[in-house]
Amino acid sequence: MSDVPVTAEVSNHKLAAVFPDARAARAAADALCRDTGLAKAQVKVVTPGSADVDIRLEPEGGGIWRTILRAHLRLGLAGAALALAAFALLYLADVPFIVQSPVAAALALLFFGTTAGLLLGGLVSLRPDHDRYVHATRDAMDAGRSTVVVHALSAEQAAGAADFLRARGAGVTRTL
């Protein structure tokens, strides 16, 4: 996906649309592919008897490892760059500690800025927005309902799919 450069997954926009039964879910999935142009590979139906739920929900197992590396690298470097920019601004503002001990100040700011970026990279890697999506599907399965899972390639595609499925009476849960 290109609009969130810190991740390495093809589909960062996922949604789960819960239907009362498998027949309604399959009909909605077929109509979604037919009427919106989503590829069949982007749309999965998860029923209470589905054995491969984890793969249907998160099919890009290798993508998460690339996301971990990319997020930590890019956000760590961004944190370091912001720290150096803060150092430069503080130095130009003649802040006494910065001016009197520029090496110590630069190293301290660099350490904390890089650490903050790496922590943010860890948060991105955890994908906390996916919890609601996964739980909605699992809760539906526990209740005997079926879910249409959509792996959209853009936020616009996810919004269109969500609107389409809501119009068919589904309860929709999206990732951010």
Image (spheres, rainbow, N blue to C red):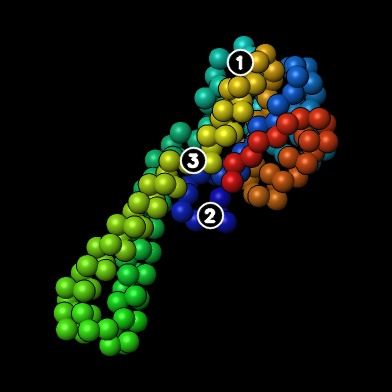
Q: Is residue 39 left or right of residue 4?
A: right
Upstream in sequence: badge 2 or badge 3 = 2
Circle 2: residue type: Val
Nearer the viewer's eye, disc 2 or disc 3?
3
Instruction: Say whether residue 35 is visible.
Output: yes
**Residue 37 spot, x, y in % from top left:** 76, 41
Q: Residues within 10 Å of mark 1 (few under 14, many from 20)?
A: few
Alpha carbon distance from label 3 to label 1: 22 Å
Image-quadrant location for residue 2: bottom right
Q: Is residue 55 left or right of residue 152?
A: left
**Residue 151 spot, x, y in % from top left:** 62, 38
Q: Secondary structure at mark 2?
A: loop
Q: Is residue 3 left or right of residue 22?
A: left
Q: Secondary structure at mark 3?
A: loop
**Residue 139 spot, x, y in % from top left:** 60, 22
Q: Is residue 154 left or right of residue 113?
A: right
Circle 1: residue type: Asp
Residue picked out by circle 2: 4
Residue 142: which numbered mark, if any? 1
Q: Is residue 123 above or below residue 3?
A: above
